[in-house]
Amino acid sequence: MNTQSHIRNFAIIAHIDHGKSTLADRLMELTGTTTKREMQEQLLDSNPIERERGITIKLAPVRMSYQKTEDRGQKTEDREQRAEDGERKIEGINPSSVIRHPSSYILNLIDTPGHVDFTYEVSRSLAACEGALLVVDATQGVQAQTLANLHLAREHHLTIIPLINKIDLPNARIEETKQELCNLGFKEGEIVLISAKTGQGVADVLNAIIERIPFPQGDPDSQTRALVFSSQYDTHKGVVVFVRVVDGSLPFKVPFKGLTLKGLYSNSGQIRFLQSGSEVTPIEIGYFSPRMVASGGLTCGEVGYIATGLKDVRMAKVGDTITVEKTEDRRQKTEDRGQRTEDGKQRTENLSSVIRFPSSVIQPLPGYHEPKPMVFVGLFPIEQEEFTKSREAMEKLRLSDSAFSFRPISSTALGNGFHCGFLGLLHAEIVQERLSREFGLSLLATAPSVEYRVQLKAGVNPSKAGILSSGQRTEDRGQRTEDEKQRTENPSSVIRFPSSVFSITSPSEFPDPTFIESVEEPMMKLTMYAPKQYIGPIMQLSQEKRGEYIDLVYHMDQAEFTYLIPLSDMIVDFFDNLKSVTEGYASLDYEFFEYQKADVIKVDILVNHEKVDALSFLAVRDQARLKAKNIVDRLADVLPRQQFNIPVQAAIGGEIIARADIKPYRKDVIAKLYGGDRTRKDKLLKKQKRGKEKMKHIGSVEIPQDAFFTVLKRN
């Protein structure tokens, strides 16, 4: 078995479409992880959506075994001599790890997404590694997400190996790309030139991984601690967690025929999740190659999976720490803890609460910060009978996508549904498509919205303003003066509702304008890379989106723009327009900057003078009329005609700002008349008119689901 010094854990990071998955294919092919018969392009992109869109949306781990030999590594004589003399020194590498004889290494690779919406996947992958391969397209050079991922890797203190990919293309800018990487702090001698498509230089990448990236530094003899960096749900195996063993080991005995897994594994001890407190007996432990392969356990520094058998998806969370303790050790620790208690607490007859793992003994791993959703979309089942099925599907999907969040809501027009949070618009589209394909759900999506901060006027009761107290974020209540408490005989009414700030993520939560002191909207800091000839169109587009200019820096033939743009103007079509005005050459990265005050209002849509809450939206006052006119016109086109006139209106409070009318059907009531006096025709027409007036007052308009879909879908 390979020792801990022969393990290398690394991730591949790059801008989207720079060749990460193709490089992973060549690495698996060169190490013999997959056969030529099993090999296919982007093998680690197993999700059909990934293959159709040509992007990676989910991290994918794989274990490779590499036999490092003098001839296989294709070392030059100078490199061999430096290795023998011990003169080769790489920063962060123990000289003893330079192997002079053929050795077998375990290479744990984690392929990561490249789109900015999936940065959280990249961050979780890097936390399980000691090194990273930074891939840069020779035809594109350094782009926005290249810098973002590089900063993430440096924040995790990883050893970074820069690679220039696609050097076989005729329009490759190798020297310019080298200079761009050198400007980021790399030395020219560290850069490896490769072509992931043809395999050129990939063997040098394997040698660089072994020689430069340090091996895991965990303690194999200490208490077991394993980091959960991802998870998924399997129908037969339950919750399957992806782990990196930081300290200790996770033993597992492969059962013989006739023996149960539970009885056999209990000799080694159960596993426990420190955060949730769940204790389970695993049904399988193994590694990815790239499919799941059961093994005899995982040792210190290895990456693999644990099939827990859990059916409750809430019991295993990403970022949790897994540990192993034998029953004897647990009882001994419980007795010692009881003897150390100074106050002499009496133990209850039920010892289950006493025999739990003491959380103070095992220090949990740092884990991850909870991702903050930036885009919110309402998802409603087309068939209300699928509400429970939809909730179970979302809970299972959240296992593999911890950045996705949801909570149940109810709408008068659309029924019961879910208010879902996403990191970006592409993230929202991918989740909706996965719910449709993987779980067979038919969902209606409302228009995307962002999180606003609303500050109520002093002394306003939030419930009176239409805000639930659960969303309240009050100011420091300890700073209230004694005078404020003495203003009323019942001071609780003053203390309970101070001037406070609330998070509003949907139009239905927006309070009455008379109660609002101020509204703030989220601002995003955008970094855009594009050739210099597109400076004018980019600046014009940014100004149209209410952008605030920050900086413009030139990098040879590339220009780097920095802007502050409201998230509400950016989430829908900004990236598409950016690609359009730059002919596809621009790249974009963004991060949350701060909240700024804005004149945000709520626009209601009325059909036959009745509000349709599902179509209401929040917008800046200057843009409200244009957006309202667009929705009103589209709704008037798709609603079925009735026997009476139907007004479709958009209103801000009591002010109508847009209107469109759906003309009624007109039955030819005088068709049966073949002659006679004119008064006979007038009599029938007046009778028809009275009937239509009556229908207009007592008639109701039922909006079909396909009409909602047509209006709410994004172009």
Image (cartoon, helix red, strand yellow):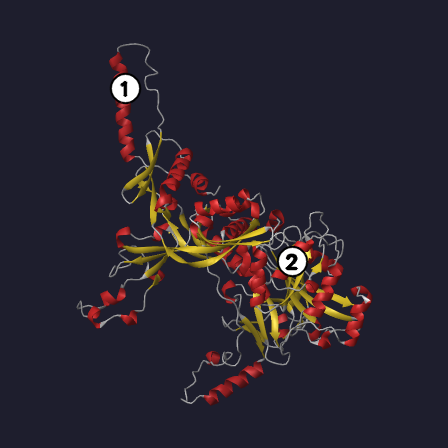
Q: Is residue 617 above or below residue 402?
A: above
Quick one: SS at disc 2?
A: helix
Residue 443 visible somewhere in the drawing = no
Left or right, residue 708 beside residue 154: left
- Residue denoted by label 2: 179
Task: Determine the image quadrant of residue 485.
Answer: bottom left
Residue under the image location 77 percent in, 68 percent down? 68
Q: Residue 525 placed where, x, y %?
A: 47, 56
In-front residue for pair 320/6 = 6
- Relative image position of residue 281 (x, y in whole percent): 58, 71
Identity of the residue drawn at 23% across and 68% down: 492
Residue 9 in the figure: left or right of residue 666: right
Q: Is residue 603 left or right of residue 205?
A: left
What element does badge 1 sit on? helix
**The N terminus lies in quadrant:** bottom right
Residue 79 coordinates in the image, percent (x, y): 78, 69
- What amino acid does circle 2 point to? Gln
From this view, report whether residue 690 is shown above or below residue 538: above
Label for residue 684? Answer: 1
